[in-house]
Image (cartoon, coloured by chain):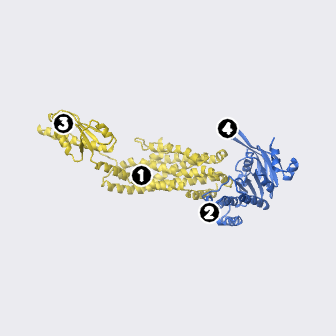
Chain colours: A blue, B yellow
Amino acid sequence: MIKALHLVKRFRDRKRGTVCAVNGVSFSCMPGEIYGLLGANGAGKTTTLRMLATILAPTEGTAIVAGFDVSKDPQLVRSHVGFLSTATALYGRLSAQEMVEYFGRLHGLDEPTLKRRIDEIFTRLEMTGFRDRRCDKLSTGMKQKVSIARTLVHDPSVMIFDEPTVGLDVMTARTIVGFIRECRDNGKTVVFSTHVMSEVEKLCDHIGIIHDGKLLTEGTLPELRARFGIHDLEELFVKVVEP
Amino acid sequence: MSLRNVGIVYRKELIDSLRDRRTVISMIVVPLLVMPLLTIGMGILSVTLVGMAMKEIPQVMILGGRDSPNVIAQLKQVKDLRIVPARPDFADEISNKQIRAAVEIPPGFEAKVAAGESSTVNIYMYAGELKSGFGAERLQRFFRELRDRTVREHLEARHLPESLTRPFDIEEKNVAPPEKVGGAILGGLVPYFVILLCLTGAMYPAMDLTAGEKERGTMETILCSPVSRTHLVFGKFLMVLTASIATAVLAITAMAFSFGAGKRMLLGLTNGATDAALQVTITGKAIVSIFFVVMPLAVFFSAALLALSLFAKSFKEAQSYISPLMIVVVLPAVAAVLPGVELNPALALVPVLNTSLVSKEIITGTYHWDLIALIFLSSSVYAGVALAIAVKLFQREDVLFRT
């Protein structure tokens, strides 16, 4: 599970001075659930998810991810998390298999387990046809599959997706959406950020609307609709974020 | 520290880098080509050019001398000089390389010589121009011989011995073995190239493994794996060090082989003339010693380059940071070649210059073990500091996620 406890992240910017990108965000997500962080660009989604994945350290507050504190045991958190975003690119000069093997080894898998996991994942994601092809020679869809395989190789209990479908064509985006749903069905804790309303409606069990670094409201989709008396999610979102 | 994780990162970076054309060129191709080109290519080129210049019969001009017909007749008979008619713009013609030199015979030269009066012959040439120098040298030789002949005739006419004008001789005797004389010439040049190649070998991998990763978006991918940032930087550092050492080893090896081959070829070209530089033999002991002193410098370069290029957002930005570093390295490396700069305990603490100076001494067969130990120690300290900075920078979010 994930439990974000008053997460705060401040950056020092040469032009703007101290910037508070995330300001006291708290939420929780249980295994077998998808929590969607909905927000405009610059709302603080990526920074929140990077703190959950321990890529960034919180300035204040903390989070418990898969039973470990992100501030105290970042390495243990990372061993139980799969993190996927459009910013997590592949090593172009490695083959698809080498890429996944590299991350499997870094996650401490022994060679027989690693081989078994790779065979399983490559078969399930239909990647065997291009396993030895270099990543920079793969199509966008193939690359996304390699990224998915990379996040799954250590069988994490928590999955974090940061705007995973941005810039992807419809077919590739559908693969990702299907994969997120599959993660939930397999009992994993899933948090993902997006600004695409249709994805939120399709996938999320819980929704948190984030704006200017603050979590303005959260709940299930029916709860939010009832709370604001608006059915259309886009309209609802605008009502929440506009002063 | 988990050596397993460092090893995994190192192995991946090695595979990745060996598939990068730029790294392979800087790590393998450049050292294997530069040294043979430097020793064999440049050697052959210079010997050939000097040979060609010497074979040319220089065109020279005689200015004045109408009242000295015998001297002019003798000059015209000199086989390796071609006399051209005198013109007032002789200086321009020398500058434009139409003629190589000119000689000005003063009025009444022959009469004055016969009377035993002093007079001056002026030879005009373009200083620093090889062929002009050869032309002037031949004119000088002619007039030197004429002067000696005249002195002899004057002495004979007065029944005086020839030794009167040369009561004693002065001769310089060299106590330095020929290889040391050659080593002093070559010794400064070789470490300069080894140090420079050591730096260039580390340059591309350092930029690729840091700024390159940021640019390609793989930095975030690796940061979400459980490997600690210290292990990550050590794995990357080992790869950069491998490239640096591989470049240095290949450069030293290529240098030793090509120097041996070049020496044989040059001795053939110069018909066995033993120039001091050709007396140098780079021994196995010297190669091992140079490698030993260059090693901490390679560690220093690798860590410093890694730290510096981590600051950059892109490969291009990293290049703009690192290019000035080339000058910072080249200056002390070149300073070692300057005459009079000798290794002492103070200079043994100056990075790069110390390695350059000690390598120069090693090539000439001089081993100051106390200074070598001091250099190894000081270079190791600098390397350790640079590595600590690199590790520290890898912990900083504002550096890793600089946009």
> Are the residues flagged by discs 1 and 2 from a single subunit?
no
Closer to us: A241 or A10: A241
Closer to us: B81 or B84: B84
Q: Earlier in the sequence, mark 4 or mark 2?
A: 4
* Camera-side mark, 1 or 2: 2
Q: Which mark is residue B2?
A: none
Q: Find the distance from the CA under tag 1 to the CA under tag 2.
A: 41 Å
> Are the residues flagged by discs 2 and 3 from a single subunit?
no
Closer to us: B335 or A178: A178
The quadrant the N terminus of chain A occupies is bottom right
Look at label 3 and name its amino acid: Arg
Q: Secondary structure at mark 4?
A: loop
Q: Find the distance from the CA under tag 4 to the CA under tag 1.
A: 51 Å
Look at label 4 and name its amino acid: Lys
Position of A92 with respect to B253 (left or right) is right
Viewer can see residue B97: yes
Please name the residue that numbered disc 2 is placed on. A133
Q: Find the distance from the CA under tag 3 to the CA under tag 1.
A: 51 Å
- Identify the chain of the residue marked 2, using the numbered disc in the image: A
Q: Find the distance from the CA under tag 4 to the CA under tag 3.
A: 85 Å
Position of B401 with respect to B334 (left or right) is right
